[in-house]
Image (spheres, grey):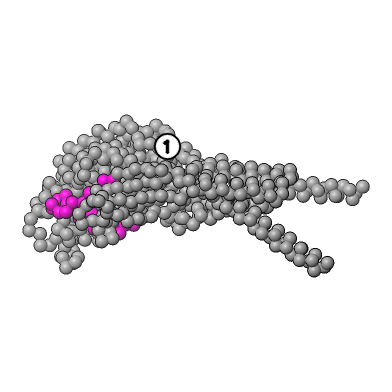
C-alpha cells in the first residue's frame, strides 16, 4: 500500500509540475506576443513633432554691398603639402566681411590650390559648424584640392581667428529684435557670400564653377548662401536641414542654439522661422545639390531631413543618408561621393543620381523596386518603428531588368525604408525615406492560439476562484497603467516640448550606446510584469518598481546633461508609472497588513 501511495504521489507531483510549466509557458507566450503587438501599434518612432513651416519671408537679402564693397584682403603666409603624390599650396588670409558695431569684421581663412595649375579651376567654399573653425576642414580641403579644385574655408564671425563680434552664441543666433539682419545666421551667411566674392576676383578661379559646402551650422549657411547668391552654382549641405520647430520639439541639441527662455510657439519663434528656416531656402534651390545627412542625428530629425530634401525643386538633387550614424563624424564614403559628384557637375564626370523608387504593399509585405544604374548595385535600408531599432541593409536582386526587394516585419508596425546606390561596398547616394504601416498576422494569431489554449487549460484543470480573479484583475489594471505610463511624456521642457523615454532613445540612444538593447530590456520587463499577472500577481510590484527606476534614471540623466540649462519638469507618464507601482504595492501588502492587524486585535482581547 505504501509503495502504491508513493507511486501515486510521485505521479501527482509530476503532473502538477507539467501543469505549472504549461501555465508559465502560456503566460510568457501571451505576454511577449501582447507586449510586442501593442508596442508596435502604439509606439512608433521616429515620430513627427511638427509639419513643415509655411509663410516664408526670405526676400530681405540685398547682396549689392556683399558683391561690391572692398574686401581688403591680407595674405598672412603659405605652406606646401603633398596629397597622393600631388603638390598643393595652402595660403592663409583674412578679409573684411562687413561693418558691425562700428568695427570691421575680419574673417580668417585659407585657400588651398594645386601647385601646377595651368587653367582656371572650379572652386568650393567650405563652412564649419557652431563654434568650430576652418582648420576642422584643412585635411579635407587638401584632399579635394588634390583633385584639381581650389578650396577655400573660413572662420565664421566670432569663431576661430576671426573677429570676436558678432558672437556665435544662443542669444545672438535668434537676435531678430531689429529685423533679420541682427541674427547671427545672417552675419555668418554674409561672411560666406563675401568669400564667394573673393573667389570671383581671382584669375585662377572659374567664376562659373563655384560651389558651397558646410556641415551643421555650415550646412545651414550652405542652404542660405546657395539659395540667395546666383554666383553659387552647386551646394553640398552636410548634416543640416529645415523644419526648425520639429528640431526643437524633438528634444534635439538644436535646443542649445536658442536662448533658455525661448518659447517654440512665441512670436519670436515664428519670426525666426519665417526668416531663417532652411526649409524655405531649400524650396528655392533650383541648382545642383548633394545632401549628406545621417539617420540618427542629434540635431536634425529624420522627418526634417526628408521634408527639406523633398522641398528642393531641382530634379537632379542627390542625397546620401547614412544609416545608424550620428552628427559629428563624416560617414565613410561621403568625401568620395562629394568628389565624384563635383566632377559630374563641373567636369562632365560620371553622373551620380538618387535611386528612383516604386513600392507596393501586398498584404503584410512591401515590395520595393528601382531602376538599374549601370555599374552600380542597390540595397534597401530599413527599420521598424519600435523605439531604438537599428537600420538594416538588405541587398536587392536584379530580376527582369529591375532591382527588387521585399520587407516583411514579424510584428505589426510602421516601416521606414530607403534605397541605396552602391559601388564596391561604398554607399554613394540614396533615395528619400518612405514609410508604410504593415500588419502581419503572426502575433495576433499567436495571441489567439495562446488564449484558446489557456481557456482549454482552465476548463480541464480547474475553475478560477473569485479571489484569484480579483488578484489578477487588479494586477492587470496595474500593468495597463504601466504601459499607459510608457505612452505618455516623461520629461517636459517648459515652453518647448514634452518627450517620452522613447523619444530620448531615438535622439541620443545610439551615440551613448543604449540602442537597441535598452528597448529590448524594457520590453522584456514589461512582458515579465504581464506574465506575473497570471502567475504571481503579488510580485508585479517588483517589475513596476524596476520600470519606474529605469524611467527616473533616464529622466535625471537627461535633466542633468542635455537639458541642464533649461526649465525641466517630470511629465504625466512618470506620475502614471508611480501610480501603477502604488496600486501593486497597496494590493500586495494591504491584505497582509489587515490580516496581521486582525491577529493583533485578537491577541489583545
| For residue 544, above or below residue 5 | above
Q: Is residue 163 visible?
A: no
Q: Position of residue 339 (x, y in %)?
A: 20, 56
Quadrant in which residue 572 is drawn: top right
- Taking the magenta stretch, the answer to whether it contains residue 356 is yes
Q: Which residues are magenta?
A: 328-357
Q: Tell me which residue sits at (64%, 42%) in the image.
A: 477
The mark total stands at 1
Q: Position of residue 302 (x, y in %)?
A: 37, 46
Q: Tell me which residue sits at (14%, 60%) in the image.
A: 114
Residue beneath label 1, please?
264
- Taking the magenta stretch, the answer to whether it contains residue 360 is no
Q: Residue furthest left?
A: 118
Which type of secondary structure does the marked residue at label 1 adopt? loop
| For residue 86, above or below residue 273 | below
Q: Is residue 28 visible?
A: yes
Q: Position of residue 202 (x, y in %)?
A: 11, 51
Amino acid at each position: 500500500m505504501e509503495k502504491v501511495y508513493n507511486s501515486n504521489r510521485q505521479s501527482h507531483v509530476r503532473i502538477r509540475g507539467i501543469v505549472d510549466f504549461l501555465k508559465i509557458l502560456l503566460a510568457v507566450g501571451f505576454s511577449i506576443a501582447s507586449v510586442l503587438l501593442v508596442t508596435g501599434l502604439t509606439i512608433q518612432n521616429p515620430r513627427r513633432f511638427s509639419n513643415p513651416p509655411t509663410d516664408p519671408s526670405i526676400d530681405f537679402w540685398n547682396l549689392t554691398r556683399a558683391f561690391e564693397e572692398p574686401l581688403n584682403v591680407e595674405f598672412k603666409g603659405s605652406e606646401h603639402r603633398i596629397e597622393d603624390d600631388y603638390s598643393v599650396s595652402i595660403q592663409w588670409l583674412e578679409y573684411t566681411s562687413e561693418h558691425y558695431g562700428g568695427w570691421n569684421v575680419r574673417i580668417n581663412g585659407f585657400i588651398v590650390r594645386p601647385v601646377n595649375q595651368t587653367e582656371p579651376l572650379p572652386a568650393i567654399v567650405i563652412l564649419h559648424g557652431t563654434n568650430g573653425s576652418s582648420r576642422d576642414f584643412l585635411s579635407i580641403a587638401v584632399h579635394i584640392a588634390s583633385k584639381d579644385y581650389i578650396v577655400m574655408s573660413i572662420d565664421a564671425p566670432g569663431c576661430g581667428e576671426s573677429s570676436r563680434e558678432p558672437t556665435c552664441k544662443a542669444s545672438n543666433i535668434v537676435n531678430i529684435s531689429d529685423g533679420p539682419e541682427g541674427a547671427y545666421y545672417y552675419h555668418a551667411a554674409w561672411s560666406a557670400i563675401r568669400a564667394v566674392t573673393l573667389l570671383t576676383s581671382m584669375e585662377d578661379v572659374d567664376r562659373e564653377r563655384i560651389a558651397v559646402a558646410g556641415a551643421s551650422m555650415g550646412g545651414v549657411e550652405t542652404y542660405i548662401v546657395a539659395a540667395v547668391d546666383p554666383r553659387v552654382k552647386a551646394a553640398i549641405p552636410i548634416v543640416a536641414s529645415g523644419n526648425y520647430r520639429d528640431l526643437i520639439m524633438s528634444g534635439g541639441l538644436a535646443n542649445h542654439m536658442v536662448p533658455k527662455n525661448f518659447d517654440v510657439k512665441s512670436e519670436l519663434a515664428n519670426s525666426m522661422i519665417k526668416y531663417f528656416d532652411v526649409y524655405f531656402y531649400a524650396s528655392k534651390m533650383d541648382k545642383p545639390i548633394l545632401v549628406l545627412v545621417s539617420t540618427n542625428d542629434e540635431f536634425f530629425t529624420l522627418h526634417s531631413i526628408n521634408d527639406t530634401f523633398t522641398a528642393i525643386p531641382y530634379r537632379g538633387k542627390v542625397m546620401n543618408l547614412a544609416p545608424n550614424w550620428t552628427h559629428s563624424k563624416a560617414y565613410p564614403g561621403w568625401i568620395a561621393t562629394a568628389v565624384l559628384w563635383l566632377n559630374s557637375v563641373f567636369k562632365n564626370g560620371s553622373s551620380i543620381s538618387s535611386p528612383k523608387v516604386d513600392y507596393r504593399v501586398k498584404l503584410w509585405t512591401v515590395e520595393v523596386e528601382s531602376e538599374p544604374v549601370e555599374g552600380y548595385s542597390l540595397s534597401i535600408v530599413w527599420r521598424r518603428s519600435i523605439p531604438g531599432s537599428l537600420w538594416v541593409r538588405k541587398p536587392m536582386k536584379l530580376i527582369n531588368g529591375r532591382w527588387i526587394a521585399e520587407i516583411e516585419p514579424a510584428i505589426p508596425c510602421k516601416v521606414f525604408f530607403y534605397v541605396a546606390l552602391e559601388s564596391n561596398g561604398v554607399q554613394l547616394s540614396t533615395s528619400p525615406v518612405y514609410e508604410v504601416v504593415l500588419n502581419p498576422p503572426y502575433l495576433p494569431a499567436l495571441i489567439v492560439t495562446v488564449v484558446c489554449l489557456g481557456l482549454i487549460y482552465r476548463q480541464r484543470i480547474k475553475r478560477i476562484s473569485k479571489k484569484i480573479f480579483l488578484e489578477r484583475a487588479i494586477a492587470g489594471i496595474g500593468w495597463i497603467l504601466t504601459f499607459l505610463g510608457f505612452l505618455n511624456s516623461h520629461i517636459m521642457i517648459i515652453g518647448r516640448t514634452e518627450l517620452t523615454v522613447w523619444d530620448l532613445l531615438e535622439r541620443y540612444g545610439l551615440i551613448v550606446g543604449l540602442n537597441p538593447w535598452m528597448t529590448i530590456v524594457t520590453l522584456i520587463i514589461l512582458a515579465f510584469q504581464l506574465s506575473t499577472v497570471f502567475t504571481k500577481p503579488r510580485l508585479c510590484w517588483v517589475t513596476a518598481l524596476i520600470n519606474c527606476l529605469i524611467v527616473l534614471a533616464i529622466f535625471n540623466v537627461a535633466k542633468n546633461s542635455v537639458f541642464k540649462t533649461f526649465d525641466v519638469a517630470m511629465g504625466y507618464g512618470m506620475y502614471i508609472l508611480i501610480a501603477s507601482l502604488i496600486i501593486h504595492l497597496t494590493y500586495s501588502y494591504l491584505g497582509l497588513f489587515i490580516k496581521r492587524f486582525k491577529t493583533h486585535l485578537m491577541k489583545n482581547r
